[in-house]
Amino acid sequence: MAFNFFKKSEPKKEEATSNSRYIDLKVKRIVQETKDAISIWFEQPTTKIKYKSGQFLTLIATINGKETRRAYSLCSSPFTDDDLGVAVKRVDKGLMSNWLPDNLKEGQTIKIMEPMGVFTTEYATTNKRHLVMFAGGSGITPMISIIKSLLTQEPESMVSLVYANRDIESIIFKDQLAALETSYQGRLHLIHILDNAPMNWQGYSGLLNHDMLTKLFERMPDWGIDKTTYLMCGPEGMMKNVESLLAARNIPKEKMFKESFVQGTIDKEQKQTAAVSTDEKKSREVTIRYDGQEYKINVAPDKTILETALDQGIDLPYSCQSGLCTACRGKALSGEVKLDEEEGLSQSERAEGYVLTCVGHPLTDDVVIEIG
């Protein structure tokens, strides 16, 4: 049986949700999920925003006099929720992740960029598959969106969720997940792993290792490799560990999918430095086609295409600025572009000429990029 899983190999323009990429949404409610995490629920506008489970919204706010953008995965499902919801977890020194819970109030409006992202799947009532999910911390956000959609849209499919957290108080959506497990008994298999477990804890604790994964797999139904897909979302270290453990069990890479969250700017700065240290140390002209306009910019070797465009007042779409979310994706019609980070693009997207302007540096003078 053929399955239509996560479509990273099929680049296409996201379905437009309005006449503009930017929409003002009203905050309907804010829920304190844990001590350091909230969920923000927005009213759907008159013309409803269409989205897929697993996608993200880019929230835009002016902080300390400067426009700030951050991508947050949707925790709502288009099949079960009337409103749009995202989850935000405080991060040490995180600009937006601390500003939102401290300043955003119910009834206010905030600008967002239309839903984007390819950590998605199509649903069909005839599907019969097993999604094995590994989530850590706020990585549960896109997972719970997919879980709600799968359970309601595919009566023959099931989910096994391995969810790692610091302690029991850190489990985001704990009660909601428990309610879903009860409502869909036998189809949602929930496994918690805690770093710091209480004395009466009956579950797993410590680092997910080979022995623990073996025990977890013994508890999970075995539907065979053809009907099983493995999803990951959480800290990069956790996902690399899971990838290694699954590879050791001979799970093919094409059966694994992950959603990466931004981990800061250290790696990005190092990669940009490495890019400048090559023999390509000259400014290059880049032509950008966007929204029916054509712009020509001169990109310095220590700047990305996106940075240069924004400095010149060209309002290109972007979000994470780390080469992960693909909000800035464009197609290079000519010329050569070096990317500091290729994680956000599939092999077929790169082969078709897609680039990410937030981590892109022109290597030739004939670069033409169309952002559609």
Image (cartoon, grey):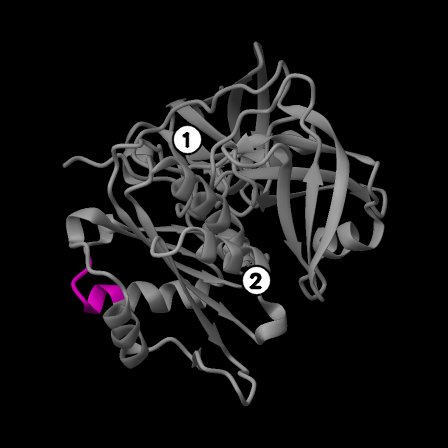
Mark 1 burial class by Cα count in 10 Å: few <14, some 14-19, many 20+: some
The answer to whether residue 95 is visible is yes
The answer to whether residue 119 is visible is no
- Upstream in the sequence, badge 1 or badge 2? 2
User: Is label 1 in contact with label 2 (beta carbons under 8 Å)?
Assistant: no
Q: Amino acid at mark 2?
A: Lys
- How far apart in space, not on screen, are marks 1 and 2 (Cα)? 52 Å
**Quick check: is 247 in the magenta stretch?**
yes
> Which type of secondary structure does the marked residue at label 2 adopt?
helix
From the viewer's perspective, tell me whether residue 314 is left or right of residue 124.
Answer: right
In this orientation, which residue lies closer to the viewer: 68 or 368? Answer: 68
Q: Amino acid at mark 1?
A: Thr
Give residue 276's position: percent from left, percent from top.
Answer: 50, 50
What span is in magenta?
246-251
> Which type of secondary structure does the marked residue at label 1 adopt?
loop
In this orientation, which residue lies closer to the viewer: 2 or 209? Answer: 2
Could you tell me which quadrant the N terminus lies in?
top left
Quadrant in the picture for residue 133:
bottom left
Give residue 325's position: percent from left, percent from top.
Answer: 50, 42
* Mark 2 lies on residue: 174
Q: Is residue 135 above or below residue 321?
A: below
In this orientation, which residue lies closer to the viewer: 208 or 307? Answer: 208
**Most distant residue in the bottom direction:** 199
Give residue 30's position: percent from left, percent from top.
Answer: 75, 48
Which of the labelled discs sits on residue 220, or is there none?
Answer: none
* Mark 1 lies on residue: 364
Mark 2 burial class by Cα count in 10 Å: few <14, some 14-19, many 20+: some
Q: Is residue 138 above or below residue 20?
A: below
Q: Residue at x 58, y 34 (%)?
A: 306
Q: Residue at x 31, y 29 (%)?
A: 10
From the viewer's perspective, tell me whether residue 98 is left or right of residue 119.
Answer: right
